[in-house]
Image (spheres, rainbow, N blue to C red):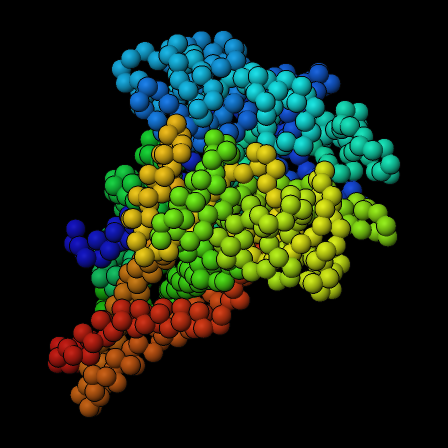
Amino acid sequence: MKYKFISFINIFGLTVGLTCCLLILTYIIHELSYDKYNNNSENIYRVTRIFNNPETKAVSLHLGTVAPPFGPLLKNDFKQIQKMTVLLPNGNIAFRYEDKLFYENDCYFADEYLFDVFKVDVVKGNPKTALVDPYSVMLKEDIAKKYFGNEDPINKMIRLDNQLNCKVTGVYKAFPSNSHVHPSIMISFNTLKDTTVYGEENLRTNWGNNSFLTYMVLPENTNIKSLESQFPAFINRHMPKGDGNSRFKQSDGTSLTLQKLTDIHLRSHLDYEAEENGDIKRVYIFSAIALFILLIACINYMNLSTARSTLRAREIGVRKVVGAQRKELISQFLIESILISFVAIILAFALTALFLPWLNQASGQNLTIQMLLKWQILLPLAIVPFVIGTVSGIYPAIFLSSFRPVMVLKGLFKAGGANISFRQVLVTAQFAISIILIVSTAIVFKQLKYMQNTNLGFDRDHIITMPYSNGLNNTYEAFRNELLSNSNFKNVGRSSRIPTGRLLDAMGSRVRRGDTLAPATLDIKFVAADKDFINTYGVKVLAGRGFSGVYSTDSTSFMINDAAARLLGFKQNQDAVGQQFGYGGTNGELIGVFNDFHFESMHQKIVALVLIPSRGGFFGRISVKISGTDIPGALAHLEKTWKKFQPEIPYSYTFMDENFERIYQSEQRQGSIFTIFAFIAIFIACLGLLGLSAFAISQRLKEIGIRKVLGASTGSIVGLLSKDFLKLVILAAIIAFPVAWYAMRSWLNDFAYRINIPWWIFLLAGIVAAGIALLTVSLQAVRAATANPVKSLRTE
């Protein structure tokens, strides 16, 4: 209470540091808790499938899903599998009940064994029977409320995708936020057996449709490596052997692995996941930031406590004279430090609750203060003030208790020398951490700007994308013509996938070898596209031509990108035109080569791609190019036309630019959080610098007075006092630059296309840190330089 300003800075600095730690701790606890709410979660595994080149063994695809025959066959062949369940993600489904018609996201086909593997809180219906019968459906609680209000939804009939009439057999609470899947609707898996797409026979024999999430429960302490070693023989035993002429076994081209359920969210980055996962690297990064900020706050306490040593010197001297031992003085100062830490952590809890909504918005999470209110968390947190108080208070306690009472009481005590050097080391460490965060923030945003502004190889502006409905198959040309009759529309195209999606679909390719088409050991992805897809996206045809409605042979023709042409051995793009080519079950001709473009995000390299003309139900999306002169008018006409041709399917659209924002959303969030925490780190470091500069200047008041009497200007005195602190910032920059460079180079390695780290970012970070330090020190230096020298010299 006697030194209110210094006490306020101490408590405020520790409070801010601890608040940052608690916010980040909440995020980390949530990330590490994924799927652990399930009973027996440590023994649940997901089956994944790897595709590789049988000759080179290079992995071309690693999916978190497998083909439908694998589940039942694995359960039959491996008796140690206790339980198994299969889910089929079905994306968005048009959902109708009476006059209510909407698209619902995250719809799944689920079998009746789901409840044996996962913990699902069913509020209505019998979980043992709800998903047994075909055309049964279970709804998430808020979905049921949306359509049925306060009515009992059980046994109500609903229509899905304008194709399936289903009966509601259950209602369940939303899966927890820390689940890697969040079904909003679950349709009985047995319904698939009656569909034309799958069918019971197809589910037993279709090895190419790898869309099925398959989970198994194994006994505790199962040797997973030993079990996986039996999978190649299992694959060779069950999978078809093709034409029988290949020298490779089936297991040479594909393999199965088991992935622990609790590892999926943070340690799984496969080519296909049920939802976007987190990243263990991000957990490590934010853990380091939390520790850095807390370290800066603790350094502040050391600096400010030793800086006020001269104020407490006489107190310590008197205590020693009346018999206080050194260990008693150390205990006194440590207890003070621990009490301040307790006050800080109580305030930090309040601020954490206040700022959690901001963190949720910035991180896209659903974090609550209740995550910290568990004894497993509260017990370690109760120990934290003792640790922080001891760590931050031990040096000031030892330093203050070492004063010689005779020197202190005679007024001859002077804190300097090695003590100042140690505090300078601490401030250097603070600014090194701050500069690392400044550099990291700048590089994250520069990479984001690069991804947003780089030439993607196609025109993404003013493109609207919509789900394609098979109900348009017979009326599509009329739908397209009606849109193009309006001057707001420039082109309309259909495709199985659209840019910003993943290229996961692949079939075997064949190239001419002499007089025959021989299998090519190449990994070429495909997209089914109509004749307007290329023009809608402004993709350039480099050689040959695009698909056209003029040539009947186009139904068996192909277009490839520049990367595929190079892989196939064509020296010039024109050499590929007219060549015989086979893909999947079709043999035909290459009619054109188009430019490489970034179909996927810049995390992935541009891969070999073939466009195949539409065959049946391959189409998944419609892409509409508008002029952009009257966007509201275009959207109104699009909605009107859609409802005219598809009254039973909800109208839904997104802009291509929104899709790009979505795929880089995690980087955007990371950059925003980096910015906030970098600012906080610098702010706390400035508090420490304020303490050190105040201490150093207080030791030189007589020197400053003499210099002023001898004619020194205010500017020269400020420069003299600031010079030493700028040296600390320069030293901090020398330490920080290589650390920041190494850390950000590792981060950028996750991008196939990335910036080169520019040197000027480091220079800018150093200048910013130096400017902030100079401003902080100058506030104290100007005050000392403009003070009346008589006050500092009157005792002489």
Relative side of 97 to 553, left or right = left
Quadrant for the C terminus, please.
Answer: bottom left
- Of residue 336 and residue 261, the one placed in the foreground of this image is 261
Residue 46 at what x, y percent from top left? Answer: 60, 29
Q: Is residue 717 above or below residue 555?
A: below
- Of residue 590 and residue 752, the one placed in the foreground of this image is 590
- Of residue 178 and residue 299, the one placed in the foreground of this image is 178
Residue 147 at what x, y percent from top left? Answer: 32, 21
Q: Where is residue 306, by image quadrant?
A: bottom left
Res. 582 in view: yes
What residue appears at the point 80 percent right and 51 percent down from the top-left corner?
A: 512
Res. 603 in view: no
What residue appears at the point 47 percent right and 65 percent down from the top-left corner?
A: 736
What residue appears at the point 57 percent right and 20 percent down from the top-left corner?
A: 195
Q: Is residue 331 above or below residue 410?
A: above
Relative side of 741 to 594, left or right = left
Relative side of 201 to 769, left or right = right
Residue 134 at what x, y percent from top left? Answer: 52, 13
Q: Where is residue 226, by image quadrant?
A: top right
Q: Where is residue 695, by image quadrant?
A: bottom left
What residue appears at the point 73 percent right and 18 percent down from the top-left corner?
A: 77
Counting labels gives 0
Residue 467 at what x, y percent from top left? Answer: 45, 38
